[in-house]
Amino acid sequence: MAREAKRRFKVTFPSDEVSVEVAEGTTLLDACRLAEIAIDAVCGGEGKCGRCKMRPNGSFKATPSSFITEAEASEGIVLGCQCYVHGDLTVEILPRSRIGRHQILTKSVAEIPHPIQPWVYKRFVELPPATINDNIADFERLTRGLGTMGLCAPLETLNELSGALRASGWKVTATISKIEPVNEVTRVEPLDRAGTLLGIAVDIGTTTMVVDLVDLHFGSVIATASDYNRQTSRGEDVISRMMYGEEKGGDELRVLARDTINELISRVLRSATIKLGKRPSAGDVVAASIAGNTIMTHFFLGLDTRRIRLEPYVPVAYHMPCLKGREVDLGINPRARAFIFPSRAGYVGGDVIADVLASGMHRSNDLTLLIDVGTNGEIVLGGKDWLASCSCSAGPAFEGGEVSCGMRAMEGAIDKIRINDDLTSSYHVIGGAPPVGICGSGLIDLVAEMYASGIIDRKARIQESGSKRTRASESGLEYVIETKGRLGKGASADLVVTDADLQNLLRTKAAVFAACSTLLKKTDESLDGMAGVVIAGGFGFHIDIARAISIGMFPDLPQEKYRFIGNGSLGGARLALISAKRRREVEDIFEKMTYFELSVDNDFYNEFSSSLFIPHTDLSRFPSVARNRAGRRGAR
Amino acid sequence: MAREAKRRFKVTFPSDEVSVEVAEGTTLLDACRLAEIAIDAVCGGEGKCGRCKMRPNGSFKATPSSFITEAEASEGIVLGCQCYVHGDLTVEILPRSRIGRHQILTKSVAEIPHPIQPWVYKRFVELPPATINDNIADFERLTRGLGTMGLCAPLETLNELSGALRASGWKVTATISKIEPVNEVTRVEPLDRAGTLLGIAVDIGTTTMVVDLVDLHFGSVIATASDYNRQTSRGEDVISRMMYGEEKGGDELRVLARDTINELISRVLRSATIKLGKRPSAGDVVAASIAGNTIMTHFFLGLDTRRIRLEPYVPVAYHMPCLKGREVDLGINPRARAFIFPSRAGYVGGDVIADVLASGMHRSNDLTLLIDVGTNGEIVLGGKDWLASCSCSAGPAFEGGEVSCGMRAMEGAIDKIRINDDLTSSYHVIGGAPPVGICGSGLIDLVAEMYASGIIDRKARIQESGSKRTRASESGLEYVIETKGRLGKGASADLVVTDADLQNLLRTKAAVFAACSTLLKKTDESLDGMAGVVIAGGFGFHIDIARAISIGMFPDLPQEKYRFIGNGSLGGARLALISAKRRREVEDIFEKMTYFELSVDNDFYNEFSSSLFIPHTDLSRFPSVARNRAGRRGAR
């Protein structure tokens, strides 16, 4: 007797003009996935992040969650991952629960070298057939035809070689990988297949991961895909994730990272179908270049992170072996070599080395400062002859964490804001909809504007203003950025910034500036000699430099000296993929980079304390800010 | 309810003074294995080789076999592998069914280089503990301590490193493998473990396999074990075995080779217990060096051999990748590197290159000829500047095949023989027991003596003599070497050599000599310039050179120019294991060795035809033989 099939129901998402049919008991989050609606669910649907808020209408069963406030519950709001379909439904998704277009930075600026000379290349050869008078072994016949010395081949290549040669009338395409110490024939295909040469560049971020599918003939990106790192469900920040790994064993985290990347690889391969005329297979991806911070790199390879977490913060290794696709368990050719960026310290990882590579600062005669601001701020100073690096625990304030009104740079986020004379605000919202929160660049604007308009003092403490916009709350004073009525649907309160939020922001900007100052001091350099500042990473791309300087976060240099490289980790990974020369430069960067440990550094703590002011205790460090202020005061 | 346990019976082997208890239904062969009595059962106990003949007394059930003659059956002789225990038994093992001490040549002569510098070595280091002011990664701390550049490490080593460092107070022993292109830390052990450094040298023979456990500090052999290649059950010679692989898929043959080697590895590790004071573990074996002919090497790695079997005899590859223990599936450290000797042609394999290495001829200013006589004869000519090689299908005549009275050099084999004036024979039997058959060296003696005493003519045809020792048989004339009554127990007929046997022996000696002559001709060299002749391989060790020359098998040079190196494949493998320099010389040998394909060579066929005489059609090629003959004739 056949078992009764599960009943199926229709779930409609009116705002997206899409319906899907799902089996009874499916979660709303899974229904969204089926409908290809991108949802902010960093925990992967385990009810642990509280982000996938939705308002269903119809027949469903929802598990209560502490992330749903009483007010929200009374409006019928549930967590999408904790709500199960039991009949036809319509579902409204709260704006903040969506992943907007801007959320994951996949853009990166890196000069493509000419000519492109990747460490993986293809050669089509037509070989003389074997005869009794020329009966050397098939592999040596191939290498003779290639005219390349010292090549070897893994057994799988040897196993496919003899058949390929004879099936194709002795015309084959060899894929060769040359990446020290490897010098091998990765693959042999019958006939001329030299046209397609694919690799992937991977940015393993703590929060998000990005994969570029790259045409290795031209160095161009064929497709990009990005998503949350599935590890996030096991801890949002690196520290909690390391603790999880220590408790539960690291393999689960390795598998989650691998699954995330493999899903992205599937997506870029799917996306490449149109450009390439046919869907490339995993086997067509014959090289990988992978950059991540030290901890992510350890997780990805299944290495123990417990000693990075605790003082003296020691990783297992900086340099990782050049592994095969099979060994790193990726959905690419099992024989493809995966280059993994070395780390320089527990908190200056391969992602920072990739930033440097993408910036080109290591090839410059001039002094350059590179700032990668994420949850950790990493700073690199130097040029062609030397590089100095450090890391500071900046905190997630600019990435939507530890700030009540903060959110990531996605649709609904205020990314620019001005405070009017009546202390109301004018702002720009990503996507144009009503605002939901403020992203990093907006927060820098906010602090700058609040200070300029006198709402906060030099210590970032909110001042009584007489306006309704500044008011007392349970936890002290707060400033109302926007009132509830003008916020996105589902907003349950005014959008405010509190004294506590501002102190977090102040500490973050102070840490970044203090790290820059400390590096300058350690290397006996000054801002006068600075040829340029490179801003890399997470939210940097959208920062208003003038305002970041005005709050004392970035050094007071002319704006034209600043440039953005976006996701330098991805950009650097791509460079190291498409250019053997750039790949070798990674080792040069590693070799010439000195690391300064700031966690026990008195200079840093002194600088940090002095930086807990807007812009700084020592105004002479910010002459342009002092001039502007004097000018403005004069104009009033 | 418990199942009834199988009944157990006692099996006694009176000659060996040993009894074992076995379950009902056990074969006699398995009982022998349990009793540690070595039995000649090349088929592995499948009833296919007919060698494990025994005479049981008691309760048993035997499956009839075509290998048991009627006469044998009437005497109660059975195949041990086809006879099942059903009660207490005593068992007599026929002498020819035993594996004698001499059967597998494990002896090899190769000069041990000084100093020993293996490509795997250990270093004990005491590292400064990690502190906040010196917090480089553990792996880079180790390589800094080792003072060795460019090292990498597989993930497993990285995974054991951090724990080992901290468990041992930062004192560890690193095992380093340096074999191009590999330069890696293979293993990290806590505390000082530098004392034990083990590797294995492996000779993968078509019939037999040998494993040496080697102390890499001193280059000395700690233990040796040898056994039949279990593949033999799938075909005794390489051709039938390749055909089996083509039909059934090669993996079965790979597994059988691996199982044979792994059993030998277990045995050498067990044997090493006393010398080392404790039983070494598989993980302690950190290097392997493996030599075999081209076909055995392909089987061992699971590569397809079908194109070696058929013209134009093309292997998949000469050079094999430098694989890890795990990849070659051996019972050694999974990270140990296995060096596999390259082959030079389909029928000039890594075993011949190992012969050359063991002989040292590639380092000599003088011209040397190397002859490895097995089922195939391989000849190498040359010195420091060049090497020329060829192969001839000698046939298994000297290894006990295709000759009715032939057997391997084991207990019961006649290894030396003289024919008396009355045409009876005097002989020496290995082990001193009554004779069972004649091994290779005995056969050379036999042909030489039969010719000298006029029993055979120059074409090796038996002549009517009037003596009872030469008589007619169904298939022509035969010579009675020994009468039944004086043979070992169980002999069912006189020990004879037939015309057909002699023709096989003649063809074999002709092939060897013709190959030597052809190489000399091709390289425009002559015997006058020959500084020495090296005899390698299977039965070479026991050959009486004067007699081999007298039948025209080896070139007519003074005996003092001949030297034996025994199992050169094993000796070469050991040299390449204990000396990085010698290991690199393997590549030199490969590079400077020219291969001549004789299978379609007119010169060879002419030489071969001229050599089908004793000693040769052209007596001037054997001046010493001609002189002796003239002298003898004069004395008569």
Image (cartoon, coloured by chain):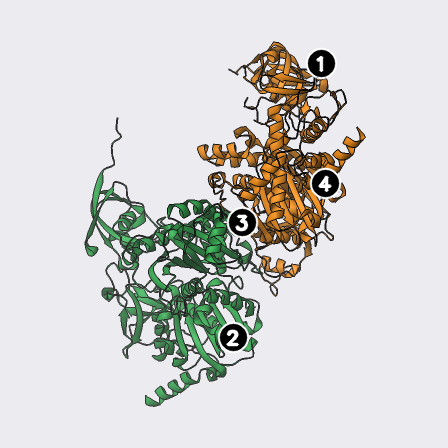
Chain colours: A green, B orange
Q: Is residue A134 left or right of residue B417?
A: left
Query: In the structure shown, which secondary structural element does the residue marked by tag 2 occupy?
Result: loop
Given residues B107 and A138, the one toward you in this image is: A138
Camera-near label (1 vs 2) is 1
Could you tell me the amino acid type at mark 2?
Lys
Quickly name the residue at label 2: A384
Q: Which mark is residue B321?
A: 3
Camera-near label (3 vs 2) is 3
Displayed quadrant of residue A206:
bottom left
The C terminus of chain A appears in which quarter of the rendering?
bottom left
Mark-to-mark CA distance, 4 and 1:
41 Å
Camera-near label (4 vs 3) is 4
Chain letter of the residue beneath label 2 in the structure image: A
Query: In the structure shown, which secondary structural element does the residue marked by tag 4 occupy?
Result: helix
Query: In the structure shown, which secondary structural element does the residue marked by tag 1 occupy?
Result: helix
Label 1: how many Cα within 10 Å (few below 14, some 14–19, many 20+): few
Nearer-N-terminus badge (4/3): 3
Mark-to-mark CA distance, 3 and 2:
38 Å
**Residues at discs 1 and 2 in contact (Cβ within 8 Å):** no
Chain letter of the residue beneath label 4 in the structure image: B
Quickly name the residue at label 1: B485
